[in-house]
Structure formats: C-alpha cells, structure tokens
Amino acid sequence: MMDVPNLHIRAAEPGDAEALTAMANLPGVRHGTLRLPFDPQSRIERRLAADSGDHLLVGAIEAGGVQEIVAHAGLMPCKRRRAHVGEVLLIVHDDHVGQGYGTAMFRALLDLADNWLGLRRLELDVNVDNHAAIRLYQRHGFEVEGTRRHDVLRAGVLIDSHIMGRLKAAPEPDRSGR
C-alpha cells in the first residue's frame, strides 16, 4: 500500500456538503458510480443531516493551509435479519486517484466493520469496467458473486455491474476462562 501520512480520515459533517457535491459531480466519479450529472447539494446535505445509522467518512489532506476533501466512504449497516451485513461505498476525487487514498479509506471502513460493528458480511456493486476498484476490493477479500447484465445506464449505454461480497467468520470465543 502507498503511504498516505497526510490523509486525515474523519466522520463526514454537514459542513462537508459543498465539497462532497463538487466531488460527486466530477466526470471520473460519475463514470465509475451510479451518480447522475448535476447532483444537487441539497441531496448530500440531507444525507449528512440524517440520523440513519450510516457511517460516512471523508479523507482530507492539507493543501495550501486549507483542508481539501479527496475521498468519501460509507458503511451502511443493514437491519433486522441482515444486521450482520454492511453495504460499502467509496469515491475518490478525480485529481487524486491512484495515490493511496482509496486504499486508506477502504481500510478504515473494514476496521470499523470488523472491529467495532462486528459485521460479518460486506457487499458492494461495481461497474465491470472499473478495474482499479475491483482490484482494490479483491485485495481486501471481496469476491465477485455475480454480474448483473445491462444493469447501469451510463451516457446512453447499458453496462454490466458486479455484485461483490466479503465474508468474515465470527471470532471464536475465549474458552480459557480468563
């Protein structure tokens, strides 16, 4: 993994809405995700203000004395009989792809899922042509579980998407009596 000592990962806050909206509307982010063009800031503001139980993170770097958000990640725990499952999202600013920020954010999500929330299954959708993202997810134990044919309409063309998942066994109880 690339070393990213200048990346500060923290919870997303309502004040991040403007920067997250700008990032969500970038051509590269839109190409690799289900984002529509011209996504309004109000939609992101509502998501950040909601008390949904989602865990939304931002990764920021210091640039010219100002914090610049370069990545956004989310872990959305499911409910009821799927309470052991979390859905994952990850986007990286077009200008900062390939610099290790996505990997750092993804590792933070996995730590949260495994060591704090006790989730046993993580899942995500990824466009089949998003090769860098697929490699990142596979390096962290995700497997392609299926492919949805003609699943996503992007710029007038239907493309396929993969369903990827990662299973983690529950830890064995300590039977030593300590």
Image (cartoon, rainbow, N blue to C red):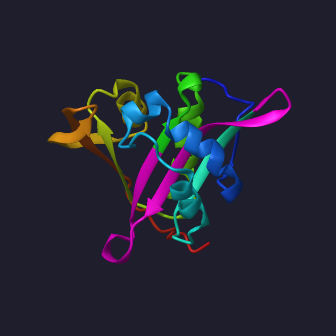
Residue plotted at (49% across, 70% down): 175
Residue 86 percent location from the top left of the image: 41, 59
Quadrant in the picture for residue 171? bottom left
Residue 10 percent location from the top left of the image: 69, 50
Residue 133 percent location from the top left of the image: 40, 31
In the current view of this chain or complex, which residue is farthest to the left? 149
Residue plotted at (60% across, 50% down): 57
Between residue 95 and residue 54, name the one nearer to us: 95
Between residue 79 and residue 157, name the one nearer to us: 157
Q: Is residue 152 left or right of residue 40?
A: left
Residue plotted at (34% across, 25% down): 131
Residue plotted at (57% across, 74% down): 177
Q: Does the magenta stretch include residue 91?
A: no
Residue 114 visible from this viewpoint: no
Between residue 27 and residue 91, name the one nearer to us: 27
In the displayed structure, 74 sits above or below 95; it is below
Residue 8 percent location from the top left of the image: 72, 40
Please state the total of marks drawn on the protein image.
0
Q: Does the magenta stretch include residue 69?
A: yes
In the current view of this chain or complex, which residue is farthest to the bottom? 80
Q: Is the magenta stretch mostly helix, strand or loop?
A: strand
Q: Over which residues does the magenta segment extend?
A: 62-89
Q: In which quarter of the image is the C terminus?
A: bottom right
Residue 40 visible from this viewpoint: yes
